[in-house]
Image (cartoon, grey):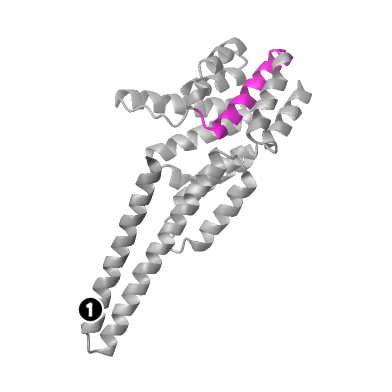
Amino acid sequence: MWFIKKHLKLIGKSLLYLGFLFVIFTLWTSQNSTLMKGVLTLIMVFVLMSNILYDYLKKLNEDLQIALVVECDLDKVSSIMERIKRFDVFKGMKPTLILTQTLVYLDAHNPQGCINHIKEHESFFTGHPDYLLIHYHSLFKSYVYLGDVDEATENYTQLQRFKQTSKKKNDISQLYSWHEIDADYYHITKSYKKSLEAYKAVDLKRYNNRECIHYYYGRACLELDMKHRSNIRKYCKQIEDINKDSPYIGALNAYDETI
């Protein structure tokens, strides 16, 4: 069904372009003024180039999302982002690039880079409720990875306020699993049993590959702290099955050495 819809949409857009060209051509041939013909030609070129550029950027954005959340290929993500920057002449993709870079820092297990990036674009993140949620969650996750209990607690508190406000509006965001947020908080505050219960409550069927990597890493670190070493290889293998080059494989081994 999606295949048919995709091609119907393509046919519809092609017909729209042809209709536009026909109208411009009709106007162009009816003009005696060379100046007006030049103006119509410029309009035609501008509109067509703008639409071609829009479609190309849209395709790049689709590729970006697949590389980020399905393939979890950070090199590919960086390459696509560079192409978007090069062709985004109207800067319409700037919000996407800022948000994606936030996730890239986390996926590269570079929490300090994520924190610096968010602080650099503080005003951007406060401009939209979903962006604000990403702001608090990304900071929370970063401070959890850094082991900074005070800062993690501060951002966890902000997330809980956000959740309560959303409840009152009957509009709780589904961007993140609140169970996993609780699990991370209980883990860093050494409430290991509560953390494990919260991790077990997470519905992994709702997760994409990117989210699964962070889940497996967090769960493995918790079980290392709980001396449940028999499960660690399982979580490491699950990360490898998604992307054998994931930075979280090395991060998990490094965490193991600190226990």
- Asked if one can make out residue 190 in the rendered structure from this viewpoint, the answer is yes
At horizontal 37% and vertical 51% (from top left) the residue drawn is 7
User: Which of the pair 188/92 is nearer the observer?
Assistant: 92
Measured from the top left, where is residue 24 in percent x and y? Answer: 26, 74
Measured from the top left, where is residue 154 in percent x and y? Answer: 52, 27
Residue 59 falls left or right of residue 144: left
140 falls in the magenta region = no
Q: Looking at this rendering, what residue extends furthest in the top direction? A: 193
At horizontal 33% and vertical 79% (from top left) the residue drawn is 41
Q: Looking at this rendering, what residue extends furthest in the right direction? A: 257
- Asked if one can make out residue 102 in the rendered structure from this viewpoint, the answer is no
User: Which of the pair 7/179 is nearer the observer?
Assistant: 7
- The part of the image, by quadrant, that contains residue 21 is bottom left
Q: Amino acid under label 1? A: Leu
Q: Name the residue beneath numbered marker 1.
A: 27
Residue 60 falls left or right of residue 21: right
- The part of the image, by quadrant, that contains residue 254 is top right
Measured from the top left, where is residue 222 in percent x and y? Answer: 65, 18
At horizontal 28% and vertical 68% (from top left) the residue drawn is 20
At horizontal 36% and vertical 71% (from top left) the residue drawn is 46
User: Which of the pair 130/136 is nearer the observer?
Assistant: 130
- The part of the image, by quadrant, that contains residue 200 is top right
Above or below, 24 relative to 133: below
On the rendered image, what quadrant is the N terminus found in? top left
Secondary structure of residue under mark 1: helix
The mark tally for this picture is: 1
In the image, which residues are magenta? 207-229
Chief secondary structure of the magenta portion: helix
